[in-house]
Image (cartoon, grey):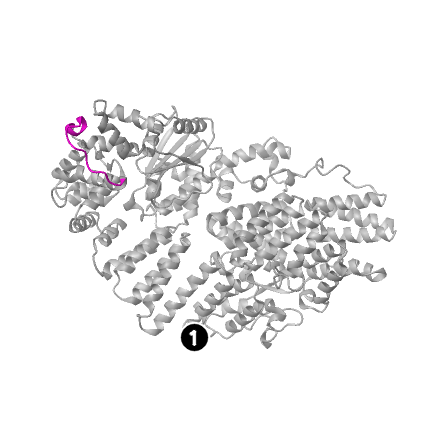
Amino acid sequence: MLVGRECELRRLADVTAGVRQGRSHALVLRGPAGVGKSALLQHIANHAAPGVRVLSTVGVESEAELPFAALHQLLRPLLGSVDVLPAPQSAALRSAFGMDTTPADRFLVALAALTLLSEASRTEPLLLLVDDAHWLDSPSADALLFVARRLGAEGVAVIFAVRDGSQPFPAPGVPDLRVPPLEAGAARSLLAHLLPDAAPAVRERLLREADGIPLALVELSAALSPAQLRGAAALPDELPLTERLQRLFRCRVTGLLAEPGNALLLTAAEGDGDLAVIVRAAGDTERALDELSAAATAGLVSLDPERVRFRHPLVRSAVYQGAPLSERRAAHLALADALGEGDDRHVWHLAAAAVGPDDRVAQLLAEMAGRSRRTGGVATASKALRRAAALASAPRDRARLLIDAAECAWKAAGTAQAEALLAEAEGLLTEAEPLSEVSALRARLVQVRGAIAHASGDPAVACLILLEGARLVQEDDPRLACETLVMAARSAWVADDPARLAEIAGLLARLPAVAPEVRNRFVTHLRYLAGPAGAANPDTRHGGPAPEVLDGGPAETAGTDGRKVPDIWLSGTDPRPWVWPPTFLPYLLDATEPLRDAHRRAVETLRNNGAIGSLPMSLAPLVALELVTGPWPTATANGTEALSLALESGQLGAASHLRAMLAWLAAAQGDGDRCRVLARESLELSAPRRIASAITLAHWAQGLNALAEGEPLHAVKLLGEICARGGGAGHFMLRWIVLPDFVEACVRAGESERARQALTDCGPAHPALANHPQLRSGWRRGRALLATGDEAEELFLGALADTGLSPFETGRSHLLYGEWLRRHRRIKPAREQLHLAEAQLDGVGALPWSELARAELRAAGGRPAQESSVAAAPQGEEQRLTARELQVVRLAAQGLSNGEIAARLFLSPRTVGYHLYKIFPKVGVTSRAQLYGRSFG
């Protein structure tokens, strides 16, 4: 009987009604222990509409270290259809469930779960109920939340139940429904139903003690004797609620725990409810079944031929914690023997039974952690490694295991836990020997600490940490040193530290030639990037094109002006994050087109492999390249997707850059409100962490937006933070990209001297201008705005002379040249330039600038190609489609099926079909066949 839950039941009824109509829902029930969350789930299961299939799973504390245990329990009824999944997804799911030995990416497992549920919902709507979600194993929780956030038109509902004060269960993007304690009237009605003949004083005492928690009312009522209920005997003393319930449960189970090895204690220790294992561990089948039957009769457990489950987690806790340590240890040993070697649960029970150093069990735990890592269970691996470290006898081994555990914890988004583990390992290294191994371990510790600092903290601090680690092993382990130095170089670039880049280049060049294939790919380009700031080191000077690669280095691919870029940035298949160039670095190396195409191939490969965790770091530089080369709708689609994935996986550095780039794009397209929101959110991440490159990009976006909105003075202030001397938001290389906008803002604001000073600071002989057509064109355009007569015209023509320039920048150069020509009463050539500007700027969707070009055309007596207002302006296909629709329609035009598109974009096939339903009228087609072969940018 559910009393006082009318609001909650209405909300849940809406969910079940929605799935019958093909709408998907996700919901998290949150409330204190015993408040009735499980009862609500049971109610919705019992009253599901006809034709709705209910699948359920329960989080179990002892299974929290078994990867994908809960997901397997939920999907087990559907596994007969696993062969209909795309091959990579099918293999991943089989591997996760122990049906295959192929390593699986945890995100690919999640995608497989989404696809399997989507396919199953074709025949009947699905209702997924997840009780005690706070005890879910981490891979299952990640997979189910992945599914919950991506449900669309499948007709699938997911409802989680989470206990307050337990293990955290963050579920961003999934709405919560609070289940509060019962109000006084409802609690009184429930108690009247439970105890119609109880004495009034007893009812009042129980109401006061239970404080609106239905479970407490039920359990306290059941525990009282008839004499107590009548008021003839005293009630128990008042205690804090949680302790009262624990003691209550212990009181109820004491009579069932009379002998060591009791089946009820084995059930509490086993956790999974596997009746066959529990009976084998008990040794006496008949006695075990009798004991469990007695517990079922007492209402403590539910029992069927395969499984035994405690009616409430607090009952299990009371049984387990109420037993002496010796009996709990004996139970775990018996369960380990019953399971046998080859089962990961065998190892966990051995570990639970260990009471002192045990190197054999520690080794088994470490091996199990390795298997968990290969199947995406990094959180489980971290827990196993922590326990292994506690059991290892040698300080050196304990430190090694703790470092491995910290790395896994960090990958599982447990940054604080990872840092604590590293600190513990660091303390052990002072006791460990031999010294050579200690140095290697310390270097690995520092590498993990530096990676954490780079991903979620200050990149300058990360760089110093990583440099320290590299120096520790530069003689004994040059490959580890090389890897750590390249990570340090990424941090130095992001932190705006060219001197560190020069230092790192020198250290890399001096490493022994044990790792030349990695080292030589980077040394030359680090020296080029270090630029004049590294000129104090003669090895880092350059006065023209970037130096050739060192002898013995790998082949390289030429950029647009003949400069070479390392093939390591063109392969796109290496899963290690440090081989990817930082955001906007490919543009500054002037290799936009080959690197853009390489990154697109890389993203395609990652999508095909289901490596969703690697996508933010590969999509971020691709978005930067697409801002330059276009098309912008593609950049929007990729950037939006990458931002969502970066936030999901805790990659805050990538998230800050992506928000800044999307803010810049919003400014260029005239969406000022969106620009301001994204730029502010980017700075909220980057400013406290001193992520200099992201700070610069966000300020650039804000300045470009001010320029687009006709506020040049405000633009001067914002862009001056980047370009002017003493600016607080400048980046030693990104400032060259921003310079043309700063000069234009100064000229429009009447502050020509500030513009002239900025241009003087980067004279025509500067290497950044000598080597880069885009930067050189912007510099010439800025000089033209300040020059007069023939010199100005020569500079404008020079700005338009280089090939392969950004369409946006080329359009703006035509616009400014046309304005100059009109002011000098050269009307016919002015119209020609303004028509070119309008076409180029309309082509990329730069509405503020295309409108300015049209205004100038009208002032010159010309007629714009598009006379209508911005609001009524007809849009091309790409502008009418959302970012996600654009991704879907491009793949559909290539002939891919809904299932293949879903696998690429980490959606369900049903959601793909829903997008196509909306796309057809937007692009003027009535069938899929009409899309085939069409180009959508």
Q: Is residue 95 left or right of residue 885?
A: left
Quadrant in which the N terminus appears = top left
**Element at badge 1?**
loop
Residue 316 at x, y percent in the picture: 23, 41
Which quadrant of the structure image shows residue 751? Answer: bottom right
Q: Is residue 701 above or below residue 225?
A: below
Residue 304 at x, y percent in the picture: 22, 33
Q: Is residue 428 left or right of residue 740?
A: left
Q: Is residue 642 above or below residue 509?
A: above
Q: Is residue 762 visible?
A: no
Q: Main secondary structure of the magenta part?
A: loop
Tell me which segment is drawn in magenta.
226-240
Residue 408 at x, y percent in the picture: 38, 56
For label 1, the residue is 475
Q: Which residue is painted at 79% across and 60% down in the image?
A: 786
Answer whether residue 737 is magenta in the image: no
Which quadrant of the structure image shows residue 2? Answer: top left
Q: Is residue 395 visible?
A: yes
Quadrant in which the C terminus appears = top right
Answer whether residue 232 is magenta in the image: yes
Q: Residue furthest right?
A: 825
| Three-letter code, disc 1 | Glu
Q: Is residue 883 left or right of residue 169?
A: right
